[in-house]
Image: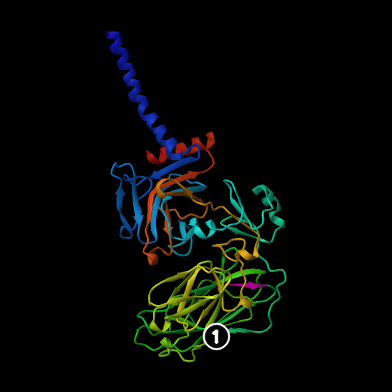
């Protein structure tokens, strides 16, 4: 019996001595993610230490559950909403899988918080794009990408990719294509074009430069209808999205809403020696700044996502010389939104051969044109046109430099192939859907070893819709650690902990 207890004592001592090292080794292995793969999951049934609850709470329903407690879910009632994930190590890629329901939202996006000039800087990818899902072209897909063909020519994705460098009649949507956009037959203009339609607030647009300076004169006025300072910053980015120029214009000195509108002010932007290519101009300001005129020698000027037309009697108390004539807009947006803040902006808007009535102020109206590009006829102005896509004040000044990096579906009539890493969501039981979105983490913004994601459906609030979410799963991947890397990282881990 004594021998038995002696052996039991020895084994117990060994366990007590070895256990901390085993536990430490297990912690190191998990925290360093030796195999390069780790998966986190949140199913709404309980608190998760690795994926936060959705927030803010006032945009969400309570967490619901079935009678048998088998299934839990939460509804997004207003957008956007956010969640964060723990990031134990540096990873190359995140794959986010979401189980959800959606009937009428044409576009649901998932965004990753990235490094940038502002806190709200996100790289968006589609979780569901119903416009693309309804495209009736033949398609080929595998884990890498999906290829739509107007007329079926390629039998495999590899065949298409082999020919990609020689093709010009394709577009890429969330698929990396290493090709610089160029207009081979482009010729500079010698004279100035004048856009005398008054625009309100923030705008951005593309232009093209070849053997010419970038030459713009913006005429602005500060309307002074609200309290506070009104600043303008003009920023210019090249085709690699690198900022090459910024000019800041101070407030006019009138900061009360009782002050009159400022006098017109001309702001010149003139840059020489630019390489050939696409440039993006951002007019960053609040809605108190009005652009009375844009004068330029550039041949092309394509607005991005928004045009706020304001040549209306609504502003006659502060602005003189407004152009009350109807405005015709050339649009390549696949889904159009319209908004007016004033009774003067209530009107019937012509889109191709159809009509949409804007009959209430401070209400978003949406329409999907049957044909894109489309012509928008705005009779009374005082109307914001918005969405995801490109617009121009004339067809002659329009061009599309996003063809190799579409943010949405545009101008499919001008291409024969569309390649994307987007896949149609998988339908599972009881109306639930599941889809995955992949993010490269090289430019991710990491705070306190966490990543931040956003779920956005831009029409959710206007349609008074809800999006139930049942599960969020995030898979991180990187190269597995070699033995040498593991040794050094483990030593560093122990040193930091102890």
Query: Residue 398 placed where, x, y %?
Result: 61, 74
State yes or no: residue 208 in magenta.
yes
Query: Residue 395 placed where, x, y %?
Result: 61, 76
Q: Nearer the viewer, residue 203 or 271?
A: 203
Within-10-Å neighbours for mark 1: few <14, some 14–19, many 20+: some
**Apparent side of residue 359 relative to residue 162 in the rendered image (left or right):** left
The way the protein has been coloured in the rendering is rainbow
Tell me: residue 399, above or below residue 429.
Answer: below
Determine which quarter of the picture holds residue 41: top left
State yes or no: residue 59 in magenta.
no
**Apparent side of residue 91 relative to residue 137 in the rendered image (left or right):** left
Position of the C terminus, as image quadrant, is top left
Question: What secondary structure prevails in the magenta region?
Answer: strand
Tell me: residue 453, above or below residue 14.
Answer: below
Q: Nearer the viewer, residue 459 or 167?
A: 459
Task: Report which residue position mark 1 lands on.
Answer: 196
Query: Residue 142 placed where, x, y %?
Result: 59, 46
Q: Secondary structure at mark 1?
A: loop
- One can see residue 441 in this view: no
What span is in magenta?
A: 205-209
**Apparent side of residue 326 relative to residue 228 in the rendered image (left or right):** right
Residue at image location 65% in from the left, 65% down from the top:
414
Query: Residue 442 placed where, x, y %?
Result: 52, 52
The single residue placed furthest to the left in the displayed view is: 1
Tell me: residue 64, above or below residue 129.
Answer: above
Position of the N terminus, as image quadrant, is top left
- One can see residue 216 in this view: yes
Determine which quarter of the picture holds residue 210: bottom right
């Amino acid at each position: 019996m004594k021998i038995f207890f002696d052996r039991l004592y020895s084994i117990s001592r060994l366990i007590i001595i070895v256990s901390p090292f085993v536990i430490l080794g297990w912690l190191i292995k998990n925290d360093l993610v030796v195999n390069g793969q780790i998966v986190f999951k949140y199913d709404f049934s309980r608190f998760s230490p690795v994926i936060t609850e959705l927030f803010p709470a006032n945009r969400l329903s309570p967490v619901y559950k079935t009678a048998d407690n088998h299934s839990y879910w939460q509804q997004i009632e207003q957008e956007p909403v956010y969640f964060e994930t723990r990031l134990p190590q540096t990873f190359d890629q995140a794959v986010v899988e979401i189980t959800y329901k959606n009937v009428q939202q044409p576009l649901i996006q998932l965004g990753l918080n990235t490094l940038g000039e502002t806190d709200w800087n996100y790289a968006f990818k589609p979780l569901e794009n119903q416009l693309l899902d309804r495209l009736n072209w033949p398609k080929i897909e595998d884990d890498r990408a999906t290829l739509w063909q107007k007329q079926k020519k390629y039998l495999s994705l590899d065949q298409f990719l082999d020919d990609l460098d020689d093709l010009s009649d394709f577009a890429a949507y969330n698929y990396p294509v290493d090709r610089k956009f160029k207009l081979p037959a482009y010729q500079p203009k010698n004279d100035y074009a004048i856009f005398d339609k008054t625009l309100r607030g923030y705008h951005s647009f593309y232009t093209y430069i070849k053997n010419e300076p970038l030459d713009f004169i913006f005429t602005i006025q500060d309307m002074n209808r609200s309290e506070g300072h009104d600043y303008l910053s003009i920023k210019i980015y090249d085709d690699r999205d690198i900022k090459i120029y910024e000019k800041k214009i101070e407030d006019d000195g009138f900061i009360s809403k009782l002050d009159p509108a400022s006098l017109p002010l001309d702001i010149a932007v003139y840059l020489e020696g630019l390489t050939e290519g696409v440039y993006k101009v951002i007019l960053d300001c609040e809605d108190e700044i009005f652009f009375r005129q844009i004068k330029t020698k550039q041949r092309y000027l394509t607005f991005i996502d928004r045009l706020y037309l304001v040549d209306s009697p609504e502003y006659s108390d502060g602005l003189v010389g407004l152009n009350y004539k109807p405005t015709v807009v050339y649009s390549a947006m696949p889904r159009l939104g319209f908004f007016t803040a004033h009774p003067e902006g209530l009107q019937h808007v012509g889109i191709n051969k159809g009509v949409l009535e804007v009959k209430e102020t401070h209400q978003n109206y949406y329409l999907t044109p049957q044909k894109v590009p489309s012509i928008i006829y705005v009779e009374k102005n005082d109307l914001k046109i918005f969405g995801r896509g490109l617009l121009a004040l004339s067809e002659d000044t329009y061009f599309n430099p996003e063809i190799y990096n579409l943010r949405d579906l545009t101008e499919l009539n001008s291409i024969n192939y569309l390649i994307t890493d987007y896949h149609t969501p998988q339908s599972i039981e009881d109306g639930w859907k599941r889809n995955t979105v992949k993010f490269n983490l090289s430019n991710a913004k990491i705070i306190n070893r966490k990543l931040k994601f956003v779920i956005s459906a831009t029409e959710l609030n206007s349609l008074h819709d809800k999006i139930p979410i049942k599960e969020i799963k995030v898979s991180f991947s990187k190269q597995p650690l070699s033995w040498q890397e593991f040794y050094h990282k483990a030593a560093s881990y122990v040193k930091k902990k102890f």
